[in-house]
Amino acid sequence: MVVRIGSADNRPGEASVDLAEQTLVTLDEVTVALPGGGERREGQREMARAVAEAIQTDGHVVVQAGTGTGKSLAYLVPVALAGKTTIIATATKALQDQLAGKDLPFLNELVDGGVNFAVLKGRSNYLCLQRLNEAEADDRLGLDLDNDKKKASLDSDLLNRLRVFAAETETGDRTELPDVDDRTWRLVSVGRDECPGAGRCPVGDDCLAERARRKAAAADIIVVNLHLYAIEVMVEGILPEHDLVVIDEAHQLEDIMSEAAGRTISPVRLQQAARAASAVLVDRDATGGVEEAATLLHAGLESMIGERLIDGLDDETGQTIDVIRGRVDQLLNALRSVPKDAPADAAAKALRARQGVTSLLDDIDYVRWPIDDEVLWVDGPTSNPSLRSTPVAVDKILAEKLWAKRPGILTSATLSPQISSLLGLPKKTPTLDVGSPFDYEKNALLYCPTDLPDPRAEGHRDARLAELEALVVAAGGRTLALFTSWSAMRDAAAHLESRLPWNLHVQGEGSKMALLESFIEDDESCLFATMSFWQGVDIPGSTCNLVVIDRLPFPRPDDPVLQARRERAGGAAFRVIDLPRAATMLAQGAGRLIRSSSDRGVVAVLDPRLATSRSYRWDLINALPPMRRTKDRADAEALLRELRDT
């Protein structure tokens, strides 16, 4: 029996059990109990000890743990034993599913007293009973929520199905209704900015989102999305009180935190505010004024997409924002005039609309007068240009709002050497790299053709496509090709589709999950994808013997936020901003190849700079797993043919 630290088995007056010591004992027992019998991994034990020591001293720790380390159990075991209320925040749905569906239930069977855990998502992931009631009472609820003028509506069959779901569901989670599309779901859900709270909602006592939150508040371990946790850092009170946080996939925290700390206004957001208000307002002047304001905003921003507004808003744009603010303020006043004794449904709609409009006003004021530490810029697409204000850095935000309040365990398979300073961790925070148990030297080959033209030179495209085709043919399909742009991916797919005898799956032709399933089921197929497939994708086995990376993934030079960070870094900008990001993403992409101890294959980087750049090639190579290296295509083809034929 595994004893939880601080359990009844540790009697008062008896010597306290050292958490690190008990963690290693427990980890060994857990490893033996794994299906098929697990093997002892020194990297996993080193990580588990470091996590336990951080918990016991109320400190922080950063751990880089390569694929196959078993990092989930390395932090779950000490967390479970410590008995502290802990939030685990991860960026990928696959890891959330692994934690909640596999690792935590497994530990629950082994730890004395069990492990009480819960999964909590953002409010819009849960069915809103009040909105469902309104949908049943009002067949005019089919609102135009997007710019494409299509209507979403709820027919009687779907309403009946949703009502049955509401009565029978344990969670109210949208994932239980995978065939309900996004547009329809928005009609029966509410976001954080819209919800008035259970105490002010007619059906608040039965709220499914609140039920999930109550369950989470009673749990010892709560699994959440990293985006939701970033919002919690900024707002507080969204998630239950907790003593400890584990940030998995910590290499994504900086960008996710920047997004959560920023503010955005857009034409679609104005339209949504107006149409939410139109559900309760008889006088259309106020809602019509905001609809017109959305058109004004669109016209004012469309030509500025991609621009960084270094000096703030120009006079014309500033005046436009002032006009828009006035219209939104009028709408808020109109909503405040809705009688307090209005019918319950009307009062609920008015309250939701006021919540959303108030939040919109706050953000308008924020982007109208940005502060020095913020980047003001205009983002796309052209159908909905948005004015955004984003912090240049998040280190101070995290230092003050997170690390000063609770210990943090941060881990990922790939982490920048600057991770602690970027995320505002104390200077003396322990940082360690426990490696990977996989034999990359034996099982993986890194191929970089040095005779290819530079990616910026004429002739590179044709040479790159010829190289890609030759490698895919040698592999017999079984290829995950990762591209740094949509245009490069589509160009390669269009060129090779008729030249290859195997199925070619291309990102954009279906959901990410559907594409991965098709690729895995057809082990001679190819999958061409962009940046969202570079990380969080697990394809073990012979389905993927070849990972091709079209070029080094340096960030875009015109990214407004990164431009501001480069200016702050001065002459060191490339080595401080661009190179670490490229190294991390390259390692993430290459990491898609070896996902189990028996996997073998080739990582081909079709960018000669990886081998020829004297100034930074070793920074990139050293960030990759320790694979054998070659510049001779014959070596790569020989290995791929061997794997294909066996």
Image (cartoon, helix red, strand yellow):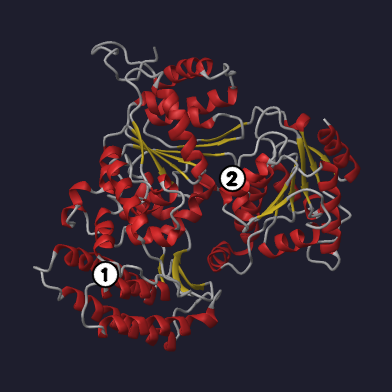
Q: Is residue 338 above or below residue 449?
A: below
Q: Is residue 87 above or below residue 335?
A: above
Report the residue at 40% width, 35% height from top.
Answer: 59
Hey, what amino acid is under mark 2?
A: Pro
From the viewer's side, name the closer residue of 514 and 533. 514
Residue 196, disc: none
Res. 235 image quadrant: bottom left
**Alpha-carbon neighbours of circle 2 within 10 Å: few (<14), some, or many (≥20)?**
few
Residue 213: horizontal and vertical position, in percent?
Answer: 28, 43
Q: Is residue 513 left or right of residue 354?
A: right
From the viewer's side, name the closer residue of 215 and 61. 215
Can residue 573 be seen?
Answer: yes
Report the residue at 34% width, 70% height from top.
Answer: 363
Residue 351: horizontal and vertical position, in percent?
Answer: 21, 65
Q: Is residue 260 left or right of residue 568?
A: left
Quadrant showing the N terminus:
top left
Residue 464: horizontal and vertical position, in percent?
Answer: 82, 58
Residue at far front of view: 157
Residue 358, disc: 1
